[in-house]
Each structure stands twice: as structure tokens, then as C-alpha cells.
Amino acid sequence: MRDYTCVDIETTGISPQHAQIIEIGALKVRDGEVVDTFSQLIDPGVRVPEEITELTGITTKMVEGEPSISIVLPEFIDFAGDDVLLGHNVRFDYSFLKQNAMDLDLEFKKSGMDTLTIARAKCPDLQSRSLDFLCNHYCINDENHHRAFNDAKVTSELYLMFYDMFRDDNPELFQPREFIYKPKKSAPITEKQKRYLLALISYHNLGVEYDINELSKSEASRKIDQIISTKGKIIR
């Protein structure tokens, strides 16, 4: 399989239901050659945690004013089209993309391949199967690690190298498999969250287009974080 869309994302955390996507990078490959690219920062509506900035170099200032996920995700879905997805630990990326697609009522169902799965099967003696370690081990230029487009690019290069090295002995490793994502059941908004969210809305004299009572706990948390990051806390 040498036709695919290779994707990588950067996020504010590790939970698809609580963290936000802040960058999507991807490239479309046909017969092993890159034919199109996609790279976009995303404004998550909350501050980028310091530990994420230290890891990725992406700051809150960098994403402020960038398009929201509601704009970027449909564009990425159009970009990927009917392609299978490729990634390194791609189920992590897919879980975020799928969760956000579900939140936005977008159709997004994919199959894919994973260079981490291949590395675990074929490189068991290596000290690590992390993307940066594998790139260093196989002399792949990884000059901007933990930025989405760079990681998608080097993942594709790693995959094509693995394809040439291992496909004859293990063709099953290079066949796409359907992704299955089952989101955890969301708890409803708590009374404490409801009171604080209502107080923030009143304090900042905001208009809202959603029913607060219908929010989940995680959705309410995101709404609160978004208001505080853009408008500030309540000052008594």
C-alpha cells in the first residue's frame, strides 16, 4: 500500500474528550510520492499548557486568531477524501479527529496503517520505537520534531522505508485496518460548573447559543476555559 494520507496532530492534552487539537499536518501520497500537503494551526479557544509549548514550541499567541476546529476539520476531511490514513501511533490521532468529527456532526470513518505497529513487530530489539528514535536510527532528517507536518512527513518516509524492507516477508503489516473509536460516556454538567458558567456569562454580559443544561461535564469545562482565556476570571 503506497497510496495514503499521512497525518499527525498536536493537542493540548491526551484525552480526546477533554483536550483540543491545536495543529493538523498531513500529506497525500500516491505510489510513494507526495502529491499534496495540508498544514494548519488551530485556535483551541483555551490557553496552550506550558508543557505542550515546551514539547511542541506552539504557544497560545501562535494559535490566537487561527481558524477553529469547526473550520479546519471539514477542510482536512475533504483533503483526506477516501484515503486510508497512515500515522505513528495513528489511533491517537484518529481518536481526536473522530471525537471532533462526532462533536461537529461530520462523517469520518477510516481505515489505516501504523508505523508504530510495524516497528513493534519488526524492530523488537531497538531501545525505543518512538518516532524521533526511529528517525535517528534510520537516518531520517527529523528537523522540527513535534510539529504536525514535520512528523507526518518523517512518518511517511519511515513507512516507505519499512515497506521496502519488510513487505515481502510480512505483507499483512501493510494492509489497512478499520479504526474503531468508542468514546467514553460523558458525564452531565455538574451543578458547580453550571453556577460558575452562568456567573461568567452574566459577569461578562455574554450571549450564548447553547442550552447550558444539555452540556456534558467536559463540554462545560471547555466553555469555562474558553471564557476565562478570552475574557478573564470573575474579579470580586
Image (cartoon, rainbow, N blue to C red):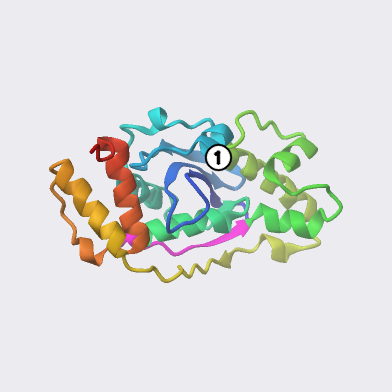
Answer whether residue 105 is magenta in the image: yes
Q: Please identify the quarter of the rendering in which residue 156 is found.
A: top right
Residue displayed at 41% across by 60% down: 99
What count of labels does the image hold?
Answer: 1
Residue closer to the observer: 74 or 10: 10
Q: Where is residue 208 shown, x and y percent of the image?
A: 16, 51
Q: Amino acid at mark 1?
A: Val
Task: Report if residue 149 is visible in the image.
Answer: no
Q: Is residue 187 above or below residue 51?
A: below
Residue 225 left/right relative to 49:
left
Q: Residue reaching furthest right?
A: 125
Q: Is residue 121 left or right of residue 37?
A: right
Residue 189, given in percent of the width and then of the height, sits at 31, 64
Percent of width and height locating residue 111? 53, 63
Q: Is residue 17 magenta?
A: no
Q: Residue at coordinates 35% horizontally, 54% vertically from top-left? A: 221
Question: Magenta: predominant secondary structure element?
Answer: loop
The percent position of residue 90, horizontal first and vertical second, equals 58, 55
In the rendered image, which quarter contains the C terminus?
A: top left
Q: Nearer the viewer, residue 208 or 163?
A: 208
Residue denoted by label 1: 34
On-image quarter of the N terminus: bottom right
Secondary structure at numbered mark 1: strand
The boundaries of the magenta stretch are 103-113
Q: Residues within 10 Å of mark 1 (few under 14, many from 20)?
A: some
